Image (cartoon, rainbow, N blue to C red):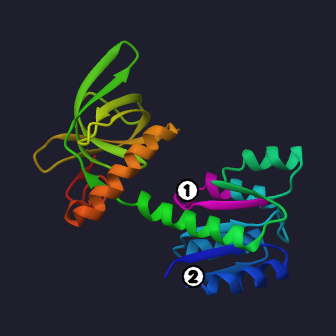
Amino acid sequence: MKKVLLASESEGFLDRNTELLLQRGIQIFTVTSGEAALKLYTENHLDLIVVDYRLDDILGCALCSQLSSTKHLRQTPTVLITRNTSNDMDMATNSGAGTILLKPVDPNKLLEVITGTIDLQAIRCKRVALNVPVVCKKPELEIPCLAHNISNSGILIETDQLAAGTRIKCEFTLPDSMHVDVEGEVVRIATSPEGKQLCGVKFIQTPLPSLRTIMNYVVSVANSAPDSIIPHYPSQHCMCS
């Protein structure tokens, strides 16, 4: 069962949307303060956090900023509900929230966003095998590499010419002949059982056409060949250096 945290100072907001989401089989946690939201999240594995414009002790955008800047919380998607004013929109845009909704929010629209975000997150968690050549580009340098696996958020490549923190462009062609050109950052270095250096590259601001191409490939492979899904990142057999 998926777990969603609702944070709002409004008891009406919490009651109304809790009832709606419970009918969809989603487990709901509710809080009225940012402090309670942070405490509850650290004690539970949540799939999504929905933050209203104002809480008892903090603005919703400030809570989202805390969530996005806290290292171990970054992987949980957030939905921020805010007012339609230029100042509030500026703060919301800079809050780190994954999705922004404007007040007033229709409950059915909120339900659609919540279920859609949870479904997308489930897809993003899937990593499938991929064995194709990859060209990694830095200024004035092209590095031929080999892909090991891919997800919607990143790719694992084999090369000993990249270091953690390196920003690169990755170009490769998926087995269905679709070309992909994305930017990324090396966020993890590992060693395979065969002694090969593996680099985990996180995609950065993936263009929508490339994201759709990668997503379609990951979903297609995961659905047609479940055995190809990689259970860990970069691999349960790799030793991190």
Tell me: 125 left or right of 240: right
Residue 194 image position (x, y, % from top left): 10, 46
Q: Relative to 240, does residue 164 appear above or below in the rendering?
A: above
Q: Is residue 159 magenta?
A: no
Secondary structure found at label 2: loop
Tell me: 49 left or right of 103: left
Q: Which residue is mark 1?
A: 74
Name the kind of residue labelled 1 in the image: Arg
Q: Which residue is mark 2?
A: 26
- Do callouts 2 and 1 mark residues in contact (Cβ within 8 Å)? no
Query: Can residue 126 be seen in this snapshot?
Result: yes
Q: Residue at x 29, y 61 (%)?
A: 222
Secondary structure found at label 1: loop
Q: Residue at x 40, y 28 (%)?
A: 168
Which one is nearer the viewer's eye here, 196 or 7? 7
Task: Give the magenta-colored segment's residue range.
Answer: 66-81
Residue 149 image position (x, y, % from top left): 26, 48
Q: Quadrant of residue 131?
A: top left
